[in-house]
Image (cartoon, helix red, strand yellow):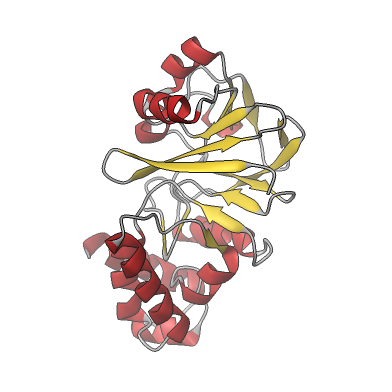
Amino acid sequence: MALIIKQFLIGSDNLGVLLHNPETGMTASIDAGDAGAIEAALTESNWKLTHILITHHHDDHIAGIERLKERYHAYVYASALDEHRIPFVDEFVFEGDEVWFGDILFDVIETPGHTNGHIAYYCQQENLVFTGDTLFSLGCGRLFEGTAAEMWASLGKLGFLPDETQVYCGHEYTLANARFAVGVDPENAALVARIAEVETLRAQGAFTLPTTIGAEKATNPFMRAAQPEIAAAMGLAGASPVDVLAALREAKNKA
């Protein structure tokens, strides 16, 4: 891969991500939840921030934009649907728009459900997608503003990406998600293997990301809501995947 990717923890479970192109010297931050943590990661790597790609408007993803712009004059992208509530943005984008990071192209994918204006950034060149709080490893975001139908459609869009696409998301929730997932899909051998991997990684203090689209399609109950065994586990045999996802999300909220 041409890009160097650095993950780091922000607060208790937010994951910061920096992308660095060693050929151009450009560095992008996916979201900007905490300027201090991002500045520390930049300093550690001796990189200068040039771009910020915002996935959605929640404060733990945008609180650092102003300070980072003041210090680095970074160019900020965010969803046009969030123009009224994300400040200091240079360019608002819609689905199908292109975000250029030097000679690296990201396609904007609108992924509502967690919030109405949530977007993901997909790079075919590098086999990467940054999904914010829509798709987590073994989970999905809470439905704060959108509906189960919107979340199912958003997960479907992401599921159409190539299986080898590496997925980076906004939080390190995998272990908690795994404990819920195995309760509704206990016979899934791929899930059982993934849980063992996750437990080992966390015991070592390592991150569980990136995952891949293919791995999530095989193990993530929210992406598998159309499968009969998931519906049956929720007491919804024969129900639509939207109804199954809604039930999964409600159960996870209470877990």
Q: Position of residue 184 (x, y in %)?
A: 34, 79
| Residue nearest the viewer, comparing 181 with 128 | 128
In this view, 193 is above or below 242: below
In this view, 71 is above or below 210: above
Q: Position of residue 192 (x, y in %)?
A: 38, 81
Left or right side of 119 for 209: left
Q: Residue furthest left?
A: 254
The answer to whether residue 244 is visible is: yes
Quadrant occupied by the C terminus: bottom left
| Residue nearest the viewer, comparing 92 with 150 | 92
Q: Position of residue 68 (x, y in %)?
A: 46, 18
Residue found at x 50% / y 73%:
241
Q: How many marks?
A: 0
Q: Residue furthest right?
A: 103
Residue found at x 56% / y 13%:
73
Residue found at x 44% / y 33%:
57
Residue found at x 51% / y 17%:
88
| Residue nearest the viewer, comparing 111 with 185 | 185
Q: Position of residue 217 (x, y in %)?
A: 55, 71
Q: In the rendered image, which quarter is residue 233 located in? A: bottom left
The answer to whether residue 225 is visible is: no
